[in-house]
Image (tube, rainbow, N blue to C red):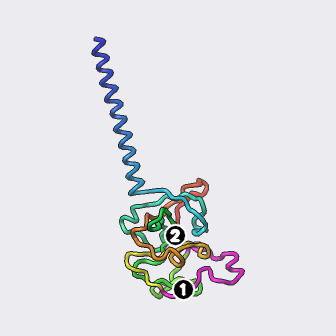
Amino acid sequence: MLERRRLRLRKLFKTEVGSWIISIAFAIVLAYLVKTFIISFFIVEGASMEPTLYNNEKVLVNKLAAYSGSVDRQDIVVIRDDGKDKYYIKRIIGLPGEKVEYKNDSLYINGKQKDEPYLPDEQGEVDLLKMNKTGDFDPLKVPNDHYFVMGDNRLNSRDSRNGLGYIDEDDIVGTCEYVILPFEHARKTD
């Protein structure tokens, strides 16, 4: 009788522990898959996206947007620097095949002026010095399967104009959806 009870307890313990091990393993695999293919978190480094995103803010990134090819103009994206373990956060300005141009602080895509509501109306020193927020450049044709990106802080951004060049669609990690930390700055990104 005692032996039977002991066997029953041992069997119950084995199934209980086995169930926990399977549940924990499943949770770990699921978390890995979600982080790898669906969402991830990145920390903003530097001032290139101010006033939209600030240094050391943590953002939630939708990786499905990159996999599905649903990246669009004005999206804020995380870019993997090809061949390096470095990431940048920038805004999509030009899409594959488009001509991008800046004249007198105005963006032109394929010759048509585009609004940039995310840029501040004034930028302190820029307005005092009567200079353009974004330097003029002649039309640049964005190659197929590539994007033209810029930081919102145009005077303080390394982007497609000056170092990053055109961004291969395979180097786009995903779109920034929310600022999640610090909590007092939590918001949807625009």
Task: Tell whether 124 sits left or right of 68.
Answer: right
Label number found at residue 137: 1
Looking at the magenta stretch, what is its main secondary structure? loop
The residue carrying pointer 2 sits among few (fewer than 14), some (14 to 19) or many (20 or more) residues within 10 Å by Cα, namely many
Q: Is residue 3 left or right of residue 132?
A: left
Which mark sits nearer the N-terminus, 1 or 2? Answer: 2
Q: Residue furthest right?
A: 128
Identified at 32% across, 17% down, the residue is 6
What is the magenta range?
117-139
State whether residue 38 is above or below residue 3: below
Q: Is residue 127 left or right of residue 82?
A: right
Dot 1 amino acid type: Phe
Q: Residue furthest front?
A: 83
Dot 1: what SS?
A: strand
Q: Position of residue 180 (x, y in %)?
A: 54, 56
Q: Position of residue 145 (x, y in %)?
A: 38, 75
> Could you give the CA–CA distance between mark 1 and mark 2, rounded to whole angstroms?
19 Å
User: Which residue lies at the image location 33% right of the left edge and 21% below the top edge?
Assistant: 9
Q: Residues within 10 Å of mark 1 (few under 14, many from 20)?
A: few
Question: Looking at the picture, how far across and down is residue 69, in whole percent?
Answer: 37, 69
Q: Is residue 135 magenta?
A: yes
Give yes or no for residue 127 being in the magenta stretch: yes
Give the vertical position of 49 relative to 12 (above or below).
below
Q: Quadrant of residue 131?
A: bottom right
- Residue 127 position in % (x across, y down): 69, 80
Residue at 28 percent of width and 11 percent of height? 1
Q: Disc 1, disc 2: CB below 8 Å?
A: no
The numbered dot on residue 90 is 2
Residue 98 got which mark?
none
Q: Secondary structure at mark 2?
A: strand
Q: Establish if 188 lies above or below 143.
A: above
